[in-house]
Amino acid sequence: MKSGVARPLIGLAAILVVAAIVAVALIQFRGGFTTSVPVTIMSDRAGLVMNPDARVKMRGVQVGTVDSIQELPDGRAALHLAMDPSQLHLIPSNVLVNIASTTVFGAKFVELVPPANPSSQPMKAGQEIDEGHVTVEINTVFSKLVQVLSSIQPEKLNETLGAIATAFNGRGEKIGQTFADLDAYLAKIEPSLPALSHDLEVAPDVFNAYADVSPQLVDTVKNATTISQTIVDEQDNLNAFLLSAIGLADIGNDVIGENRQPLTDVLHLLVPTTDLTNEYHEALNCALGGMADLTHQPPLPAPGILVSVGLTLGIERYRYPTNLPKVNATGGPQCTGLPHLPPNTPAPWVVTDDGANPVQYGNPGIMLNSDGLKQLLYGPIAGPPRNTAQIGMPG
C-alpha cells in the first residue's frame, strides 16, 4: 500500500521539478533575474519591425534590451530600455542612437554610436536620449511607391514610357558616349569643387552687395541705353571721325617712321638737360612762382621796365688772382625765400665757391675807422695802429 502511493508521488514531484527548471530557465532567458537600469529614447518613429525585447548594442556588444514601446500623443515614440548596469559606465552620456536593422526585412534593434568627442560623464539611470536616425524599411518604400503609382493615370504613363522608348531606340551608342563624356567632364571639374563650394558660400554676400547697388546699376543701364542711342544717331559723324583718325594715324606713322632715328637722337640729347632740370625743379618752381606774382601787379604807367636803382657803398676792389672766376659751386638748388618775399627785401645771399664773396674777411667795404683816415687827418702817428680791429691790415 505504501509503495503504491509513494510511486505516484515521486512521479508528480519529478514533473514539478522539471516544470520548475523550465520556468526558471525561461525567466532567466527573459532576464527576469537580471537587474536593469531604465533609459528612455525619444524617436520620431520606432519602425515597422521594432518589438519589445529587441537588443540594444554598442560596438556589436549587447548592453541592454527594449523593455517597452510607447506611442506619444504628438506622434513620436518613446522606447523604454532596460540597460545592463555593468555596462552603463562604459557608455558616455552624449552617446548617439540609431534604430537599425540587420537586413532590409529584418527586425529592428537599437544601436548606440559613440560620438566623436565622448563625454567624461557616463550614462545615468532615467536618462532621456533623442535618436538621430531610423532605417527606412522596404515596406515604407513600397507604400510610397504605391501612392505615387495610384496618382498616375495608366494611359499617360504608357504614353510617357512609349515616348521614352522611342527616343532611346537606336541611340544607345550616343547615350553611352554622352554618359562617358559626362563622366570625363565631372572628373575634370572635381578638383574645382572646393573653389565652387567657396563661391557658393560667399555668393549670398555678393548678391546682397548687388542688391544694395541695384538702383545705381539700373541707372547705369539706362545711361548706357542713352549713350547707345546717341551713337546710333551720330553714326555718320562717328564714321567720319574714325576715318579722319585713321588718316591721321597713317600720316603720323609715316612721319614718325621716317624720322625715327632723328627723334631718337633728339631724345638722347635731351637726357642731360632733363636730368639737370629735374635736379633743379624745386628752384625753377620757386622762380616761376615768384614771377607769377608779377602778373597780379597793376600795369606800368608807360611801356617798358620799372626798376628801382640806388647807390650803395663800394666794397673791396677786385684782386688778382684771388678773385679769378671759378665754376665750383656745389650748393644745389636754392629757393632763398621765393616765391613769397616781403616787399623791398632782397633775397638772401648764397655764398658759393665761384671766386666772388663780398662778405669774406678783408672785404669790409668802406672803412670809416681806418688807420689811414687818422693819419690823413692828424698826420703820421708813431707806434702800432690805434684801432685794434685793424691790426695787421693795410691802412
Image (cartoon, helix red, strand yellow):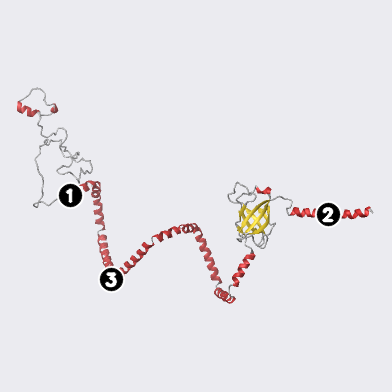
Which amino acid does the dot numbered 2 rest on? Leu
Quarter-of-image position of residue 79: bottom right
- Find residue 293 and name its label: 1
* Residue 150 placement (x, y as % from top left): 60, 72
> Few, some or many C-alpha atoms within 10 Å of disc 3 (few <14, some 14-19, many ≥20)?
few
> Most extreme residue toward the top, as rendered?
383
CA separation in Å, label 1 and label 2: 135 Å
Which amino acid does the dot numbered 1 rest on? Asp
- Find residue 236 and name its label: 3
Q: Which residue is mark 2?
A: 16
Which amino acid does the dot numbered 3 rest on? Asp
CA separation in Å, label 3 and label 1: 49 Å
> Most extreme residue toward the right, as rendered?
1
The reply to whether dot 3 and dot 2 touch (C-beta < 8 Å) is no
The reply to whether dot 3 and dot 1 touch (C-beta < 8 Å) is no
Q: Nearer the viewer, residue 123 or 12?
A: 12
- 3 vs 1, front mark: 1
**Callout 3 secondary element:** helix
Q: Quadrant of the C terminus?
A: top left
Please determine whether, in this image, residue 375 is positioned above or below residue 158. above
Please determine whether, in this image, residue 133 is positioned above or below residue 147. above
> Few, some or many C-alpha atoms within 10 Å of disc 1 (few <14, some 14-19, many ≥20)?
few
Q: Residue at x 55, y 70 (%)?
A: 173
* Marked residue nearer the N-terminal end (1 or 2): 2
**Callout 1 secondary element:** helix
Quarter-of-image position of residue 231: bottom left
Q: Quadrant of the N terminus?
A: bottom right
Q: Residue at x 9, y 28 (%)?
A: 371
* Residue 142 placement (x, y as % from top left): 63, 67
Q: Residue at x 46, y 58 (%)?
A: 199
* Residue 83 placement (x, y as % from top left): 67, 51
* Marked residue nearer the N-terminal end (3 or 2): 2
